[in-house]
Amino acid sequence: MGYFDLLEWTATFVEDLIILCTITAVSGRRQKSQHYLLIILSAVCLTGLINFLNSISTFSFLTPVISMCFSALVLSRVTSAGPLLLRGTACIMVYFVVLTIDYIVFALFGVLLGWSENTFPILTAPGMPRAMLIVITKSMDVQLYFLIRRFLPRICALKKKYHLALLLICLAAYITTQYFFSVFLYSEKDTLYRIVIFSWIYILFFVAIVIMALILITKSEQEKQTHILLKRTNQLLTENYQQLHGFQQKHAKQIHDFNHHLTALKGLEAAGKHAEVSEYINSLLSTAYRETALCHSGSDIIDAVINYKAAEAEQLDIKFSFTANFHIPTNIDPVDICGALANQIDNAFDACRNMPDADFREVKVIIKQVENFAFFRVENTAACNPFENNQSLISTKTDMSVQHGLGLKNIHDIADKYSGFLRSEYKDGFFVSVVSLCYEPLDT
């Protein structure tokens, strides 16, 4: 293997490394401990596959298609944790950008050399012009990757419909760029600038603008949703503290009344009226004093939600029980905790309201932390299996003055934000909703 062959292999490896790093940066790492090793090994495999295909002239024209499919379907599955749609979108996007940069630099080199029939062979055959072309294009790829890599994870935050739109746009741009290159090879010099400047560069910037626009739209939607959840969180906290204040006042009144009862009993006892003492005590014991069990989970926002919902369940004549242990500090935003948990319980209350017999209305809440995951499990009795006629659990409320169906959407968005999930099932007369959120423990 000569120096130029080694340079070609190195350039292919660098390009493949950038492609896999970009896909992983967009869709998230699969394993933290062996992350870089997996990417390097995957890039070696992809480099070997591409050079093998290029060595067979029959398959050389299919090399980009096969390498893209292999990267998106196989290698990225090993290095990243994102879904196939996200990995495919990132794969098409990075291939398009790398290819377009190569074509633009290739065209500019051709202009500098004075485009002629011999220019294309000079730029594709081993030699100094080809070596300079490779070094410049791969250097630009590396610099561009390090320039934008901190923005790449924002693509993951896009909605699925935006991922699909971006996939189709990048695929169309990739095909168009390939077509223009085939036209460019057989064009006269007069059409060179139009093809390069007004086609490739325009398409490249168009795709960049589309990506930025989708990110800004998603960010605006997330900020709006966060504002709604934050407002709800503040409302719950306010109402919770108002309830606690009411409990304290009620407790103070009970202590005050208890002192009067003791004074009365002492007077009856001093007068020797033992029968009246016994009757008075029986009267006090028959009075229903129910102590309210307050939640002490370790999280103020969870306590606020549970305590408020417990009081609401009492008003709705719903049996409400909970087990909450959340003593490990996490990086989960309290607004997101409120958004997920409150919406789960609200959905459970809505289902219980539809039950004609109040004796069977019951909601159970279990909150726990296992390793780096927080689990919010809410069970509620249901009059029937909600999945029978509504597999997607679409809201069936008819009041058009209020937006419906946002609860499940909020929960799904929050679960996706923390690489978690929302699972629902109907079992033994109970509808079960489980939300998991992956978090990083905070040092205390």
Image (cartoon, rainbow, N blue to C red):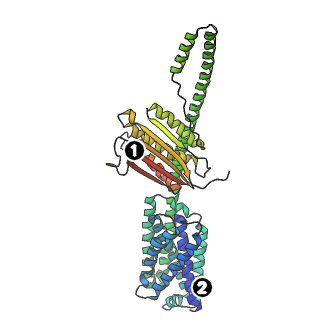
Residue 187 figure quarter? bottom left
Q: Crowdedness of circle 1 by 10 Å Cα count: few (<14), some, many (20+)?
A: many
Q: At which x and y percent is residue 412?
A: 46, 52
Which secondary structure lies at badge 1?
Answer: strand
Q: Residue at x 35, y 51 (%)?
A: 391
Q: Crowdedness of circle 2 by 10 Å Cα count: few (<14), some, many (20+)?
A: few
Write down the residue under mark 2.
132
Residue 280 figure quarter? top right
Write down the residue under mark 1.
430
Q: Residue at x 52, y 81 (%)?
A: 47
Q: Do we see residue 198 in this rendering?
A: no
Q: Nearer the viewer, residue 199 or 393?
A: 393
Name which residue type carries label 1. Phe
Q: At which x and y percent is residue 345?
A: 47, 42
Q: Nearer the viewer, residue 148 or 81?
A: 81
Q: Nearer the viewer, residue 97 or 196?
A: 97
First-in-chain label (2 vs 1): 2
Name which residue type carries label 2. Met
Q: Is residue 7 left or right of residue 203?
A: right
Can you say whether 232 is above or below 133 in the image? Answer: above
Q: Nearer the viewer, residue 173 or 430?
A: 430
Q: At which x and y percent is residue 326?
A: 58, 47
Q: How far is disc 2 from disc 1 in space, using C-alphas?
A: 68 Å
Can you say whether 336 is above or below 58 in the image? Answer: above
Q: Are marks 2 and 1 in contact (CB under 8 Å)?
A: no
